[in-house]
Image (tube, rainbow, N blue to C red):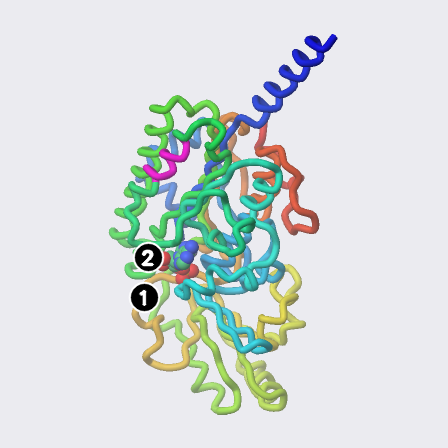
Amino acid sequence: MKALISIIFGIFLTLTQLLSSNYVILISFDGFRWDYLNRGLTPNIEKFAKNGVRALSLQPSYPSVTFPNHYTIVTGLYPQNHNIISNYIEDPYNNLTFTVRDTNAVRNPRWFLGEAIWETARRNGLITATFFWPGSELRPEYRRANYFVHYDSKFPFKSRIDSVLSWLKLPYNLRPKFITLYFDEPDEVGHDYGPNSAEVNKAIAQCDSLFGYLIEKIQKINLIDSVNIILVSDHGMTEVQKDKIINISEIIKNDSVRIHSYGYMAFLRGNKDSLEKAYSFLKKVERNFKIYRRSEIPKYYRYSQNPLISDFVIIPELGWSIVRSPEDYVYNIKGNHGYLPQWTDMHGIFVAGGPAFKKGLVVGTLRNVDIYPLLCKILRIEPKGNIDGDIERIEFILK
Ligand code: AMP
Ligand code: ZN
Ligand code: ZN
């Protein structure tokens, strides 16, 4: 009898191992616009997509910038709910600021609400790893992956892949089931030269060959049949021109209104009276932009329910930039993002393949908020409650 029980238990354990034996690698190419895949420069990604799932595009959440969207992808929450409402955040209540270049801020859990997938997975007993991702460096330890690396934009791209491979070569009981991998291109060249430049095309081709290198290496270690790869980007890119500039200081000539301009959006702060006056004036001259009281921001933008969003917000049309002075950074760039997700130029990519995915499936636009529940489903773990993502909108891409 004892022997029988132990055999049954043994079979049960093997089955559980088998059921959870698939790996997931979540890769992001920052600023890889949805249509960069249609330029004939990405043979490796296209070949992989043919054998898996490819979405027309991946719709970002507002604002379409790096930190808010990467953190949305791993939490299933809109930026207004996970609290990373931009790459630069002011907390006027506690007199604190968050910037992506501040190593203390990006490690400080007070900014990052919600639960990232690596935390959910760890809580469920899976080993996880992150080779860069916004929100991956938090203290305390349980909010990070088991293996993580502090962000360093100079870390060579190929070596990032080699590091991920060394994790996949670890003994089974130490090997991570979920891994992230992040590359800061083609965003950078997109800003410097614009989305239609030869430089961006070169970066697209470079991303594709990195992707090919990763696949080749996974094949070499015989894991290709058990690894699911999800390739995404956080947002797209659009051309910005010098004749599409709104100099807000020339419109609001009131020193008691403090303007924080992001280029693709602006926050107004100050005393209530001055703000109301500025609002009424701006409302009359609304052209190529819209001024909102926070409570008036259209609900479907999902950008009003967080007190760190200022009480008055200016949102320009696609490609228009809000500046405060002729020294503003937007005068020196040819491409930008951060605009509303309904502009297709802001859309990123979604390509996925591996044992969990259907083969040869081409689908319409997916939403980045739905990726967290998708990851949970593949990893066979229960997602955190109260998320914005919805598995029902995306699970049809799974087998
Ligand atoms: P954006 O201004 O939204 O285009 O942000 C892109 C920049 O974010 C890139 O230049 C990256 O170097 C930076 N970045 C991406 N991931 C991280 C990270 N985990 N920590 C700090 N900076 C990052
Ligand atoms: Zn980005
Ligand atoms: Zn960027």
Name the quadrant containing residue 380: top right
Q: Is residue 163 magenta?
A: yes
Return the x and y of residue 280 as percentages of the image width and height: 60, 85
Q: Amino acid at mark 2?
A: Glu
Q: Is residue 200 magenta?
A: no
Quadrant of the snapshot with the C terminus: top right
* Mark 1 within 8 Å of ligand 3, using the beta carbon: no
Instruction: Give the secondary structure at mark 2.
Output: helix
- How crowded pointer 1 is (Cα within 10 Å; few <14, some 14-19, many 20+) is rated as some
Q: Residue, x 57% and y 46% (percent of image)?
A: 119
29 in relation to 8, above or below: below
Asked whether residue 291 appears in the rendered view, the answer is no
Q: Residue, x 32% and y 72% (percent of image)?
A: 331
Q: What's the magenta region?
A: 161-168
Q: Residue, x 48% and y 51% (percent of image)?
A: 136
Return the x and y of residue 255 as percentages of the image width and height: 48, 91
Instruction: Give the secondary structure at mark 1.
Output: loop
Residue nearer the viewer, 384 or 256? 384
Return the x and y of residue 268 as percentages of the image width and height: 54, 80
* Mark 2 within 8 Å of ligand 1, using the beta carbon: yes
| Sequence-first disc among 2 and 1 | 2
Whole-angstrom CA distance, mark 2 to mark 1, is 10 Å
The residue indicated by pointer 2 is 188
The residue indicated by pointer 1 is 333
Quadrant of the snapshot with the N terminus: top right
Asked whether residue 173 appears in the rendered view, the answer is yes
274 in relation to 398, above or below: below
